[in-house]
Amino acid sequence: MKRSTQGFLSHFCSDVSVWLAVSCILASFGLASFGLANFGYGRTLETGMNSEPGKTSEPSEASTSGAGLPNIVFILADDLGYGDVQCYNDQAKVATPKIDLLARQGMRSTDAHSPCTVCTPTRYGLMTGQMPFRIPNGGTVFTGVGGPSLIAPGRLTLPAMLRDRGYATACVGKWHVGMTFFDSLGQGVVGQPVVGQGVDAIKKVDFTRRIVGGPCDHGFDQFFGTACCPTTDWLYAFIENDRVPVPPQKLIDKSKLPKHPYANDCREGWIAEDFSMDQVDVVFLEKSRRFIETHVRETPEKPFFLFHSTQAVHLPSFAAPQFQGKSGAGPHGDFILELDHIVGELMSTLEQLKIADNTIVIFTSDNGPETTSVIHMRKDFDHDGARPWRGVKRDNWEGGHRVPFIVRWPAKIAAGTSCDELACLTDVMATAADIVGAKLPDNAAEDSFSLLQPMLGKPDAPIRPYILHQAFSGQKTLAIRRGPWKYIDHVGSGGNRYDNNAGLKPFAIPENAPTAPAQLYNLDADPGETKNLYFEEPQVVEELKALLAETKSSGRSRGVVKANAQ
């Protein structure tokens, strides 16, 4: 998985030579050239290979050797609900012993939230510490070869910050923040970006060319994974660093896929010969283990940051054969079981290499559980992945964004503890900066607060003055919470339709204030968000509505605290 600089340069330079040649021709006609700089990733041509995409334009702190700093392994599950694991839900029907053990060995957060109720925006928020609604297309969910990257060139990212502090950085698994693929040369077109979705877009891609805007352009030294949802989104092929080593050659034969209620999210895309739908997470696990083992063998003095982003448990639920039929809760239960195994295997690798005590392991999810899995798991196995909250993936109610969040750090965090501090995945960046001694500039991590003191059990006061929530439609579906008060600035869920979905209709809660233009809940008194207090608490509504407007106009929540925000 180690990147070959020579191979990278040969590929990159072959592309650049074409751009330069065509640029000269275009210039002779007085036309502008078209190149990587159009995407903001061409600075290495001007300043040398030491220039690193993903950093701010301002000078950062001097890099360090990283000596003495802890390793960081961040495991991001996909569509795993708060109630899908037993350490959060004692009525869960799938055993999750490895995740539960992680919680017993560390700290379990009970009030942690994803930045958004769907995957692409959440991953943007995690990587940048900024709420995704603040940027253009911040509510986008990419499919296939969708892009360009939501992360602007020059924006400081979590991996870039850590790399600047001496960390080796690797991303394994689902990226889903956007990339730019290029089409073939011909008909006078010089590697134009491929736009659009579906099979037609895949057919246009020249897979010999460098992919722009992926993890390696945003602070990661290495990447192995997929552009979007691995077994859902049109392109069924692995990417290594910035290339597709084995391009897709044919349409997937869906007739050979499993038939069950959790198997219907696989689109009819193009698939590579080395891409097996039920082996994706097995491959990701092996790549992550290999990265850790190679790093410890070759550069043991240097800390590492591994972002392991799973396919599990995003639909379709295609668990590997060794897990099929083992959970007692159907195909989706088997997939949860496989996820638990992955967590256990990564922990075993750290322990075998004797680095577990100096490694921070964080486990969480990108949003709440998918509608299909919740509907069928409730009906068939009495398992509720959203329990005890209202709502599911896409919804602005708690079930859409309150997620498991477990941190293990034996050197600093007491075992078997829990924390009710209000937290968001955007906070990972400020927390990591606090741990490694990095100073965040004003133009980065605008919605990130350090959770280090609560993690260490030393909170003097609440860390966050408030938290922001973003549902499926971006800026149109925002919410803000201060203390127990949660103001949802729209009607309905903000995502799913409960009135015309036969599967969700049984879970619809009658509205006690049907004419209210927004929603207000007191989560201390009403954690299930059953009673809208919009008309009963007009002062709270006004305060939170004003606070939401203020944070939208200021472009940040970190460093901006109003008098009433307490």
Image: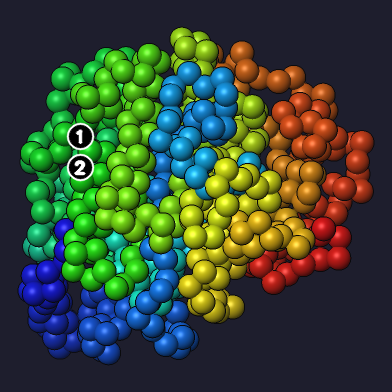
Q: Give the answer, above or below, for where 271 lies relative to 544.
A: above
Residue at the top extreme? 380
Are the two marked residues, 2 and 1, in contact with CB atoms closer than 8 angstroms? yes
Q: What residue lies at 41% left-to-right and 57% top-to-bottom?
A: 357
- Which residue is denoted by mark 2 in the rendering? 283
Asked which secondary structure carries label 2, the reply is: helix
- Near-viewer residue (270 or 38): 270
Q: Which mark is residue 466?
A: none
Which residue is rendered at x = 82% and y = 24% of the image?
512
In this rendering, the answer to whether 241 lies above or below 418 is: below
Q: In the visual, does 184 lie left or right of 405?
A: left
Q: Amino acid at mark 1?
A: Gln
Residue 66 visible? The answer is yes
Q: Quadrant of the N terminus?
A: bottom left
Q: Residues within 10 Å of mark 2 (few under 14, many from 20)?
A: some
Residue 278 located left or right of residue 165? left
Relative horizontal placement of residue 337, taking residue 502 as reference (left or right): left
Q: Is residue 126 visible?
A: no
Q: Place residue 133 in its image quadrant.
A: bottom right
* Label 1 sits on residue: 279
Please give the name of the residue rendered at 59% of the width and 78% of the height, measured from the top-left corner: 442
Element on which disc 1 rests = loop
Q: Residue at x 56, y 67 (%)?
A: 430
Whole-number angstrom distance, CA of label 2 to CA of label 1: 6 Å
Residue 235 location (% of width, % of height)? 22, 42
Q: Amino acid at mark 2?
A: Val
In the displayed structure, 149 sits above or below 59; it is above
The 10 Å Cα crowd at callout 1, few under 14, some 14 to 19, many 20 or more, is some
